[in-house]
């Protein structure tokens, strides 16, 4: 694989200011608007990253209440995901289900969020009880809502209750007004809804830049896999853009509460609305980082040209790109959807950060896409990305290698409010069920869901948005489909268990972990389910070869989940940490950690908050929240060892075809690692030996990691570990642990 | 497009002058006594060589600015609109001539506006403002 070189002359000549406009929808919305309740409040700006105010809203009673952010909350939970988990813990009982009124959606930007200097600092963390897993889900999302919320006066927004009729919450941080509204003639799908509401709530065209909308879409209402779109106004394109809080079905909770949208109008962004402790350090660190991106990105990742899709061809070259439901790791047609194509298709002569100051600017956009199917057929739209996960999940994993269809799938997932990663993995499962005869035309209501059939894939999604047909079954996710198919006697439950790529109820994201023990743990030993943001170890394990020994892998599963948790406590994006690295990174003592960037984060945090932490304290801060979340899972009935077991597809070859496709590799491993001569053994015997070895190795890893994390062999944090972290001050937390032998 | 240029056959990096260009820029444009805070820099390395840091109005900063705070004026000169600037300093980081700068304590960065004050101040007439074609924006 050769290093890709960007050729500006090959970028498609597409006018990025042109798209279908929704003036009629705006006028209809304007004409059908009713104010349900309005109240005044005092806006504030944070001091050193915090307002010390939480906004509680009950969307049923329209009750609004302010709660203080206490010293203890800051000391233990820091902000962001930590605050979200703490509010959720207090809101729910062990018996609470995702669709009970007491379940909450909490949106928290984190103390650093909203600074405009360092890359990747505009994130919001969203927490709720997941419809898919029944345990807390956390999602890290860009867009401008979180910073606007913070600069309107609040460190967190708690949404509780279930409205009887659709409701919109508008927070005007410029005027100090909150309003509940109902718009009877209101679009539901995000690309129209966010565009319409941005214009509706902005006072004039120039003010649109100060408005952000949180919304979902029609498919979220009919499924468990709904996501939330967080918007920002793209000044150059003259339209809204969307970033997604994708995983775990938070959009489903949102629509179940009958929240149509949240709208925040913040003050005009300036350089120091966070009122940080040390603006000079912030500026110095930021400029240093911008220069590094300027100098290194063009010959490292080209994130500014390709976004995260730059790794499509790398994953393929290393046999790590999911193909046909994670059966295989590469495909000859990958060349049609690799970054050489996306850097030509995406608009390049613009600034694509999802928050101010992000020089990594990976929020690429494909403009001028004319849709071929569905309710928006013929519309010209701008499509986000596609990011790597979407190219792999909606593309190779389903055998779809037509980039136009890939963009269309990406678009409809976004506007319908469903998670692209989840859809990719569940559709891949559906297609493998088709391949193996578990599904057929009769069972799918006529949809021919074979590999690569993007039209059938799209129609399944349109059905879900309409609330009909096989699409409704797909919308239950892999976990739900396994149950439904088994109940109907359509297939062997053991096979479906092996090939259904979910743990805890959440679908896998798009990396082949079969050959990476570290990534097997990185997926199945996660708190929320198999999402790579907690432990994306596959690159350092398989590409950079930085985790050669069993001990290295186990240690990585201690350190990196904690390190990466810290991003979500503060409102940071993870990508600027290790996608582009300093020129001398390889010569440092721990290149996998990117030491210079870790120090940048310490400096930015200290400069913002005025605290004086170091890199060890950073891990300690994360460990408090990480262990709290583990206890929360146990409290909700899904936090023990039995729920950390991966489907065999993520560990080794399930089927004869998979083994045969990499026979040489597996036979070699049998000789070298297992100490068994494969000569003379039947394929079934070799598959059984491989399976036993690989699963035992996984369980050994689990034991080692649990011990390193300070957990019992059943995965329960010990009381000693709670004490070490200061979590023993919460009697309810200690009680959960005690009851489970911790 | 108005562009500041230097003739290095006339300027020897300040060895024969008092850096009048920098002083004039700092005092007359920014009302500061410190020439280090000027929008151009002439540096003598002490070994017979030197560095000049001048903005050539290439427009890379316009492309990277996420706030639409940088625009060319009718003379083609890139100007900063401070009311729109969000203080992200990407313009500073991405300027490969190191000509977009930030001074300590300043919220907004600054750059040369091809005003010509330095041209008048140079005792060797090494600086000039020229009119050149506006370059196409690059992909940065």
Image: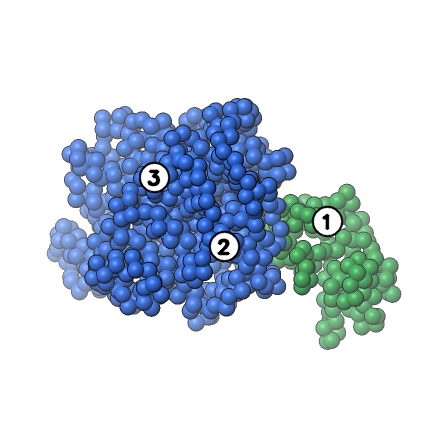
Chain colours: A blue, B green
Furthest-bottom residue in this view? B47
Q: Quadrant of residue A641?
A: bottom left
Q: Is residue A401 above or below residue A470?
A: below
Point 78% across, 53% down: residue = B114
Where is mark 3, residue-wise? A101
Residue A325 showing in the rendered view: no
Q: Does residue B23 appear left or right of residue A647 in this picture?
A: right
Is the residue at mark 2 from the same chain as the one at mark 3? Answer: yes
Q: Position of residue A475 (x, y in %)?
A: 31, 35
Which of A225/A596 is in front? A225
Q: Quadrant of residue A559?
A: bottom left
Where is mark 2, residue-wise? A52
Point 41% across, 42% down: residue = A159
Q: Does residue B140 appear left or right of residue A433 in this picture?
A: right
Q: Residues within 10 Å of mark 2 (few under 14, many from 20)?
A: some
The chain under label 1 reads B
Q: Is residue A571 above or below residue A281?
A: above
Q: Position of residue A376 (x, y in %)?
A: 46, 27
Is the residue at mark 1 from the same chain as the one at mark 3? Answer: no
Point 54% across, 43% down: residue = A41
Q: Residues within 10 Å of mark 1 (few under 14, many from 20)?
A: some
């Amino acid at each position: 694989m050769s290093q890709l070189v960007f050729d500006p002359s090959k970028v498609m000549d597409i006018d990025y200011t042109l798209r279908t406009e929704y003036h009629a929808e705006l006028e209809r919305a304007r004409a059908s608007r009713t104010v349900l309740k309005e109240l005044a409040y005092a806006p504030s700006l944070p001091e050193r990253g915090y307002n010390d105010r939480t906004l509680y809203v009950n969307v049923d009673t329209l009750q609004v209440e302010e709660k203080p952010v206490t010293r203890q909350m800051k000391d233990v939970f820091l902000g962001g995901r930590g605050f979200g988990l703490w509010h959720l813990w207090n809101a729910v009982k062990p018996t609470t289900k995702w669709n009970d009124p007491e379940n909450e959606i909490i949106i928290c930007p984190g103390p650093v969020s909203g600074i405009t200097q360092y890359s990747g600092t505009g994130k919001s963390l969203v927490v709720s009880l997941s419809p898919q897993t029944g345990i807390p889900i956390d999602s890290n999302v860009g867009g401008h809502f979180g910073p606007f919320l913070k600069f309107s006066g609040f460190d967190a927004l708690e949404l509780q209750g279930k409205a009887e009729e659709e409701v919109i919450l508008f927070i005007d941080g410029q005027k100090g007004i909150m309003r509940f509204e109902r718009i009877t003639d209101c679009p539901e799908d995000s690309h129209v809804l966010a565009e319409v509401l941005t214009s509706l709530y902005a006072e004039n065209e120039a003010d649109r830049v100060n408005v952000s909308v949180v919304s979902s879409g029609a498919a979220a209402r009919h499924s468990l896999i709904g996501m939330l779109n967080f918007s920002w106004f793209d000044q150059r394109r003259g339209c809204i853009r969307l970033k997604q809080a994708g995983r775990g079905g938070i959009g489903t909770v949102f629509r179940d509460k009958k929240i149509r949208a949240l709208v925040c109008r913040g003050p005009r962004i300036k350089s120091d609305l966070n009122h940080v402790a040390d603006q000079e350090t912030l500026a110095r660190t930021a400029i240093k980082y911008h220069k590094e991106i300027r100098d290194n990105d063009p010959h490292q990742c080209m994130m500014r040209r390709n976004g995260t899709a730059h790794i499509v061809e790398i994953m393929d070259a290393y046999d790590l790109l999911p193909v046909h439901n994670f059966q295989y790791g590469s495909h000859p047609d990958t060349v049609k959807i690799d970054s050489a194509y996306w850097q030509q298709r995406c608009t390049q002569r613009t600034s694509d950060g999802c928050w101010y100051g992000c020089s990594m600017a990976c929020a690429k956009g494909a403009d001028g896409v004319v849709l071929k199917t569905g309710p928006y057929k013929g519309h010209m739209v701008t499509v986000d990305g596609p990011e790597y996960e979407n190219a792999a999940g909606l593309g190779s994993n389903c055998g779809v290698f037509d980039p136009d269809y890939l963009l269309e799938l990406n678009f409809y997932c976004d506007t319908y409010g469903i998670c692209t990663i989840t859809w990719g993995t569940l559709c891949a499962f559906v297609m493998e069920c088709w391949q193996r005869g578990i599904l057929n035309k009769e069972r799918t209501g006529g949809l021919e869901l074979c590999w690569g059939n993007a039209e059938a894939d799209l129609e399944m999604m349109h059905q879900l948005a309409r609330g009909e047909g096989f699409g409704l079954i797909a919308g239950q996710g892999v976990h739900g489909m396994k149950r439904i198919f088994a109940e109907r006697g359509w297939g062997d439950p053991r096979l479906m268990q092996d090939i259904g790529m979910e743990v805890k109820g959440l679908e896998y994201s798009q990396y082949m972990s079969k050959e990476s023990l570290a990534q097997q743990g990185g997926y199945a030993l996660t708190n929320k389910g198999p999402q790579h943001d907690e432990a994306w170890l596959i690159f350092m394990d398989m590409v950079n070869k930085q985790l050669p020994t069993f001990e290295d892998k186990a240690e990585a599963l201690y350190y990196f989940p904690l390190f990466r948790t810290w991003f979500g406590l503060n409102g940071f994006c993870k990508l600027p940490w290790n996608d582009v690295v300093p020129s001398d990174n390889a010569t440092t003592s721990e290149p996998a950690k990117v030491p210079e960037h870790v120090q940048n984060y310490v400096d930015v945090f200290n400069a913002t908050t005025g605290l004086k932490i170091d890199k060890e304290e950073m891990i300690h801060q994360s460990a408090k929240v990480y262990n709290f979340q583990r206890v929360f899972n146990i409290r909700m009935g899904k936090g023990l060892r039995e729920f950390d077991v991966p489907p065999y597809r993520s560990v080794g070859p399930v089927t004869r075809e998979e083994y045969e496709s990499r026979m040489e590799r597996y036979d070699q491993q049998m000789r070298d690692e297992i100490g068994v001569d494969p000569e003379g053994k039947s394929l079934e015997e070799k598959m059984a030996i491989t399976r036993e070895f690989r699963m035992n190795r996984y369980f050994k890893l689990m034991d080692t990691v649990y011990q390193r994390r300070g957990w019992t062999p059943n995965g329960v944090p010990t009381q000693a570990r709670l004490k070490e972290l200061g979590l023993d001050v919460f009697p309810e937390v200690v009680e959960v642990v005690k009851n489970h032998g911790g | 497009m108005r562009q500041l240029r230097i003739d290095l056959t006339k300027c020897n990096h300040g060895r024969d002058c008092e850096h009048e260009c920098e002083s004039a820029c700092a005092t007359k444009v920014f009302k500061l006594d410190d020439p280090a805070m000027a929008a151009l820099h002439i540096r003598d390395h002490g070994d017979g060589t030197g560095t000049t840091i001048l903005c050539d109005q290439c427009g890379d900063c316009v492309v990277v600015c996420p706030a639409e705070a940088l625009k060319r004026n009718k003379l083609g000169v890139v100007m900063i609109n401070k009311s729109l600037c969000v203080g992200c300093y990407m313009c500073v980081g991405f300027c490969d001539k190191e000509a977009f700068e930030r001074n300590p304590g300043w919220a907004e960065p600054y750059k040369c506006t091809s005003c010509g004050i330095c041209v008048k101040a140079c005792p060797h007439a090494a600086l000039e403002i020229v009119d050149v074609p506006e370059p196409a924006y690059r992909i940065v």
